[in-house]
Amino acid sequence: AVDQFSPAPSSSAIWVGIAAICMSFAALTSALIVRQGSSSDWRHLTLPPILFFSTLVILVSSGTLEVARRQVAAFMTGRATQVESPRRWLYLTLGLGLLFVASQYMAWLQLRSQGLYLATNPNSSFFYVFTAIHALHVLGGLAGLLRVIIKLGHSTLRRSTLDATAYYWHFMGVLWVYLFALLWMRI
């Protein structure tokens, strides 16, 4: 069963979390700009090509999550009688999220094969820090998606739980596009 009504705290909590994440990445962005401007040891690096693929993957995952949300809404209003279709789209979103994290790991391996490690130079340090922190947040989003999938199949899924998870997931996509553009322009 799916419960249409739920308390607002889950929505408020997700926005507070998103604001905190924004502040963290704003501070890191400021540190990147200041460090690059005052550094004689800043060495530019070429972004691993896999990052273009991972950007596409996370954007497509937002689309698949929206399809699932619409199908859950149809199920909640009685326009659809089966819960299996939204579950498939949620699993696809989950798979794309895992593929995104795997592609981030592959980017780190590509940099490592070029001799660029966390402590090689300030530029590579910022790259690893930005991408690792973002990947950790994406893993949190994957945990949220798993929770939604489990609740959809075995207990009552509140619409606010799905919405909060979707807001967070879409935010991770937008944040990645921002980070990718920042790293591409600054690195």
Image (tube, helix red, strand yellow):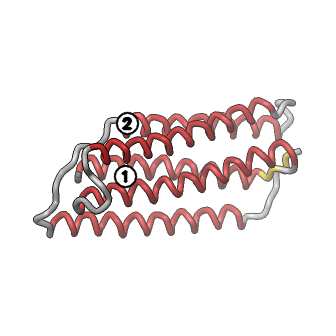
Decide which of 112, 158 is in the foreground and name it: 112
Please say if 151 is above or below 91.
Answer: below
Answer left or right for 64 relative to 54. right
User: Circle 1 is placed at which residue position?
Assistant: 179
Which residue corresponds to the image point at 16% horizontal and 55% vertical from the top-left? Answer: 43
Q: Quadrant of the N terminus?
A: top right
Quarter where residue 128 is shown: bottom left
Tell me if 117 is positioned left or right of 4 in this view.
Answer: left
Q: Which residue is mark 2?
A: 50
Q: Position of residue 105 (x, y in %)?
A: 44, 46
Q: Within 10 Å of the Cα at label 2, are there few (<14), some (14-19), or many (20+) other Cα atoms?
A: some
**Distance from the alpha carbon under mark 2 to that under mark 1:** 15 Å
Helix, strand or loop at label 2? It is helix
127 or 22: nearer the viewer: 127
Q: Residue at x 19, y 63 (%)?
A: 36
Residue 74 in the image: above or below residue 41: above
Q: Amino acid at mark 1?
A: Leu
Q: Residue at x 49, y 42 (%)?
A: 102
Q: Nearer the viewer, residue 113 or 23?
A: 113
Q: Secondary structure at mark 1?
A: helix
With respect to residue 64, does 181 lie above or below?
below
Tell which residue pokes out farthest to the left in this image. Answer: 40
Between circles 2 and 1, the one closer to the viewer is 2
Would residue 19 appear left or right of 2 to someone viewing this image?
left
Left or right relative to 184: residue 50: right
Going by the numbered disc 2, the residue's amino acid type is Ile
**Coordinates of residue 16 in the picture (x, y in percent):** 57, 68
Quadrant of the rendered image containing residue 6: bottom right
Image coords of residue 118 (percent x, y): 32, 59
Number of on-image labels? 2
N-terminal of the pair, mark 2 or mark 1, is 2
